[in-house]
Image (cartoon, grey):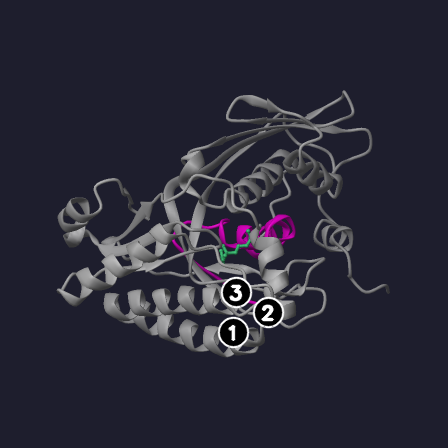
Amino acid sequence: LNPISTKADVVHHLLADRPRTPARATGHAFAPANIALCKYWGKRNATLNLPTNSSLSLSLGNLGAHTEVQGNDIGHDRIWLNDAPLAADTPFAQRLTAYLDLIRPPDTGFDVRTVSTIPIAAGLASSASGYAALVLALNQLFDWQLPPRHLSILARLGSGSASRSIYRGFAEWHAGTAADGMDSYAEALDIDWPDLRFGLLELSTAEKPVSSRAGMQHTLETSTLYQSWPTQTRADLANLHAALNQRDFEQLGQTAETNALAMHATMHAARPALCYWLPESLATMHKIWNLRAKGLPLYFTMDAGPNIKLLFLKESTPAIQTHFPTTRIIKP
Ligand code: PMV
């Protein structure tokens, strides 16, 4: 038996006994964007998107991707993003087509229409909800009836963080240890915390110069601080679980903020240094720390970009609106 070592091997394994021709005309699904409170940063296997550490996220309510997929008989893929056709030679379309190649029955093209409800400029990775919605739509189109953890693995092959966007609410992506990644999938956490809020602060709408994909690889290869990252994330995950079980907002916020800053510290110690922060990012951090020192329970997290995501409770909404009038408040 050959070991599972490529994306095609994984797909072959997961779909071995599943229908390979469409069972209906159209598959349609929604998947939410997600924000990690303990970040995925670094891969132990870059081919299969297997992470060095487990991560934990909260989805973004109704912000995400609606995807409709159909088979076509013109023999190539056609992709629409927010109703605009996407040229086949764009990197985005090429990545999507390479992904669809893994699933494609012979001589079949796909028509993929994705409408994103994420404000395009919000600096939120759209790949997570995009790949998760595509996998859910394909599952419906082919009537695979895959269990959630297999859907999560398929989404992971598109983009690591997409493994968590299969679910609404809190999700934990287990790093796993198996070489074939069959134990590296996300699961939903059964935790309801209706008073949590995110505030999206858009500090820059420019496209980031370094993708998270490239940034995490560069950090893993050159940063001496990276060796502390797995230890950091293990402690943070334990603290997040404790905070979630006790609905302890201070512990949740403090842990998420520390985790994001530790992730950025690993990048700052890379050679050459990788710094996604803008002067506005740092100014906003100081503003948050000042408000917190004055008694406002407010924390933040950041991904591989300059924008800041506020974390607070519903009761602080008026104060947040006063101090950050442009923030977009999201109920997860
Ligand atoms: O899934 P990717 O390759 O876009 O990586 C996402 C990395 C972070 O957003 C920085 C962290 C995370 O866990 O979402």
Amino acid type, callout 1: Trp
C-alpha separation, residue under disc 3 versus residue under disc 2: 16 Å
Residue under pointer 2: 52
Amino acid type, callout 3: Met
Is 54 placed above or below 81 here? Answer: below
Is 113 placed above or below 278 here? Answer: above
Q: Which residues are magenta?
A: 148-175
Bin the neighbour count of mark 2 within 10 Å (Cα to Cα): few under 14, some 14-19, many 20 and up. Answer: many
Label 3's element?
helix
Residue under pointer 1: 229
Residue 183 at x, y = what percent?
62, 66
Residue 250 at x, y = what percent?
24, 68
Q: Quadrant of the N terminus?
A: bottom right
Bin the neighbour count of mark 1 within 10 Å (Cα to Cα): few under 14, some 14-19, many 20 and up. Answer: some
C-alpha separation, residue under disc 1 versus residue under disc 3: 11 Å
Residue 280 at x, y = what percent?
34, 50
Q: Residue at x 30, y 65 (%)?
A: 253
Earlier in the chain: of badge 2 and badge 1, it is 2
Q: Residue at x 41, y 73 (%)?
A: 236
Q: Are marks 3 and 2 in contact (CB under 8 Å)?
A: no
Q: Are marks 2 and 1 in contact (CB under 8 Å)?
A: yes
